[in-house]
Amino acid sequence: MFQKDLLQGKRILVTGGGTGLGKSMSHRFLELGAEVAICGRRKAVLEETAAELMQQTGGKVTTHPVDIRVAQAVDDMVEEIWRGGPLDALVNNAAGNFISRTEDLSPRGFDAITNIVLHGTFYVTQACGKRWLDGGHKGNVISIITTWVRTGSPYVVPSAMAKSGVAAMTKSLAVEWGPRGIRLNAIAPGPFPTEGAWARLSPDPKSTERDMDTIPMRRVGEHSELANLATFLLADQCSYISGEIIAIDGAQWLNNAGGFSRLQKLGDEDWERIRSAIKQTNEKDKSKRSV
């Protein structure tokens, strides 16, 4: 579908590139000739992923441990990357989410999502954007959001709010920065199973089975499909596309206003079971980070 070396010579930063969709997109970019920088909070995970991707593709991957919630840390990271030459593209992929009744949310829980998704995405986008503008370089930003920006969604209110902010940033900066050669687009995926996010958003296997009924295509997405869409938007041949939000969800959002409206049927015992499952997932992640 894509010509060989389509992304040859391009330098691309993928936030949250050590796992999940970020890893899959990075793999595809490398296959097509790009040089990829991946960032995330866990240094060991980044280094393991980089070694794996380079072995599989023969491409070049650099790793940058960073907490994108910290503006100065983000700027320092981007400055380090720029010493090797300007980036050509940024993929805002880092995120966090979990399902919860909104009345059960703590301020800390709300901030945990919005600080990564909204603040972190802006910090990285601004850090790259300033350098593109100062140097007179063209730039390309893709942000991974959700279809909830169009419909809202119960039980994931922090994510819906934060992702809506990223959608607004995408459209706003496409106009503000467009005259100076920078374009921005967003991809709104439906269900694409990943180990971490899937455990927090769909901890109940029976619930996952019921979710298939909301997707007209009756299946979840494959990582390669999203990676190919991201590649399409990064390609120079598509440089007239800017300010767009493209859904890739098997038409789910057209069939279901918000991905979690079905949770209205759950009772207190169901929510306690869900909280317990998410807590176990968080504890596993903590134990991995401590290794």
Image (cartoon, grey):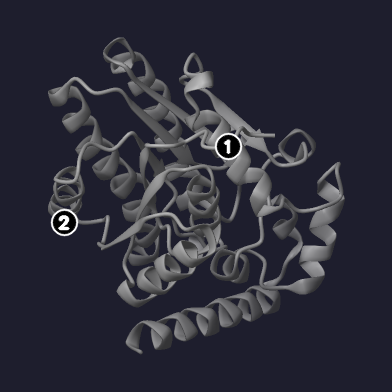
For the question of whether residue 126 can be seen, the reply is yes
Mark 1, Cα crowd under 10 Å, few <14 / some 14-19 / many 20+, is few
Query: Which residue is found at the position 45% from the left and 36% from the top?
Result: 142
Above or below, comparing residue 175 to residue 77 in the picture:
above
Position of 196 compared to 131: left or right?
right
Query: Which residue is found at the position 50% from the left and 61% from the top?
Result: 103
Q: Position of residue 68 (x, y in %)?
A: 27, 55
Give the SS element for disc 1.
Answer: loop
Instruction: State the mark number for residue 73.
Output: 2
Query: Which residue is found at the position 50% from the left and 28% from the top?
Result: 235
Above or below, comparing residue 41 to residue 85 in the picture:
below
Whichever of labels 1 and 2 marks the residue nearer the N terminus, that label is 1
Q: Position of residue 155 (x, y in %)?
A: 58, 56
Separation (CA) of disc 1 from disc 2: 36 Å
Give the SS element for disc 2.
Answer: helix
Instruction: State the mark number for residue 4.
Output: 1
Q: Position of residue 170 (x, y in %)?
A: 41, 28
Quarter that holds the C terminus: bottom left
Res 268 → quadrant: bottom right
What amino acid is found at the position of numbered circle 1 in the picture? Lys
Above or below, comparing residue 11 to residue 282 in the picture:
above
For the question of whether residue 149 can be seen, the reply is no
Query: Which residue is found at the position 30% from the left and 22% from the top?
Result: 138
Counting every numbered tag in the picture gives 2
